[in-house]
Image: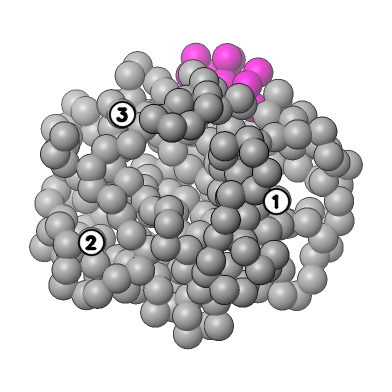
Amino acid sequence: MGITIKDQQEIQGMRTACRLAAEVLDHLTPFIKPGITTREIDRIAAEYMKKQGTTSATLGYQPAGYPPYPASLCTSVNHVVCHGIPNDKPLKKGDIVNVDVTVIKDGWYGDTSRMFVIGEASIAAKRLVQLTYEAMWHGIVQVKPGVRLGDIGWAIQKFAESNGFSVVREFCGHGIGRNFHEEPQVLHYGKPGTLEELVPGMTFTIEPMINAGRRDVKEFGNDGWTIVTKDHSLSAQWEHTVLVTESGYEVLTLSEGSPTPPPFVKA
């Protein structure tokens, strides 16, 4: 399947699904503090999705070679890079956690994730979370017609590595629309001027996974999903779904509770 270009009506469907995904994270924010379990976060999210009239895209999701995913969202704590499955272990002060939400509304998918710092964390953990957020935005601000996907990857990689971090290579952003994962793949590293050219109407995620240590990752345990850093170093990730417009970009997964973009992002 090639890259799908959305028309105005389809873009409106995406705007709605993406805003609703972000509002799930807004709703969860006050609950995410020391003592809550990630399973409880998942339960609160599932309840809220029902109220919204959305469906979780992750619950029961089963790509080839994977077991069905058992939860309504992903929770990746500390050295978990991505796809962490909610469980009964309480979050404690100093933890960092990524909460990744994808909802379906009227056949359209909205996908976004945020990092949460639990209580007071170390300076190193807070720096990783903040600079990963900035790395995502360094990628987003590249987006406009005529730019290539390699330019986005290079902007993220250059920023992350210049701050002493490493970029996970095994997982990437992706096209999204009436399917959870579409073309193109959006790498968070790369060479300027390479890969597909951006055209108006493309929608895709930018979701860098940045490690405090080495970039190597491995599967954890035998749940078929959880990915961790090989060296046990902390990992952070942020995610927005972005639309290529005639003149630049529109971030579709913004809501009232979304963190403010970094100062270098022009309105």
Identify the residue at horizontal 17%, vertical 62% (top origin): 195
- In the image, which disc is placed on residue 77? 1
Q: Decide if residue 106 is on the left or right side of residue 78.
A: left
Residue 157, picture quadrant: bottom left
Query: Considering the numbered disc 2 on the image, is that residue within a helix, a strand or a loop?
Result: helix
Query: Considering the numbered disc 1 on the image, is that residue within a helix, a strand or a loop?
Result: strand
Viewer-side residue, 211 vs 132: 211
Q: Separation of disc 2 and disc 3 at Cα?
A: 20 Å
Question: Residue 45: percent from the left, percent from the top?
Answer: 64, 27
- In the image, which disc is placed on residue 179? 3
| Figure quadrant of the N terminus | top left
Question: Residue 134: percent from the left, percent from the top?
Answer: 49, 68
Q: Separation of disc 3 and disc 1 at Cα?
A: 27 Å
Image vertical order of residue 31 relative to residue 71, above or below: below
Identify the residue at horizontal 42%, vertical 23% (top origin): 104
- In the image, which disc is placed on residue 148? none
Q: Tell how many labels.
A: 3
Q: Decide if residue 174 is on the left or right side of residue 209.
A: left
Amino acid on which the number 3 mark rests in the picture:
Asn
Q: Decide if residue 73 is on the left or right side of residue 167.
A: right
Viewer-side residue, 115 vs 88: 88
Q: Separation of disc 1 and disc 2 at Cα?
A: 29 Å
Magenta region: 45-54
Query: Considering the numbered disc 3 on the image, is that residue within a helix, a strand or a loop?
Result: loop
| Mark 1 residue crowding within 10 angstroms, few (<14) / some (14–19) / many (20+) | many
Residue 148 showing in the rendered view: yes
User: In terms of sequence position, does the residue under pointer 2 or pointer 3 come before the other?
Assistant: 2
Amino acid on which the number 1 mark rests in the picture:
Val
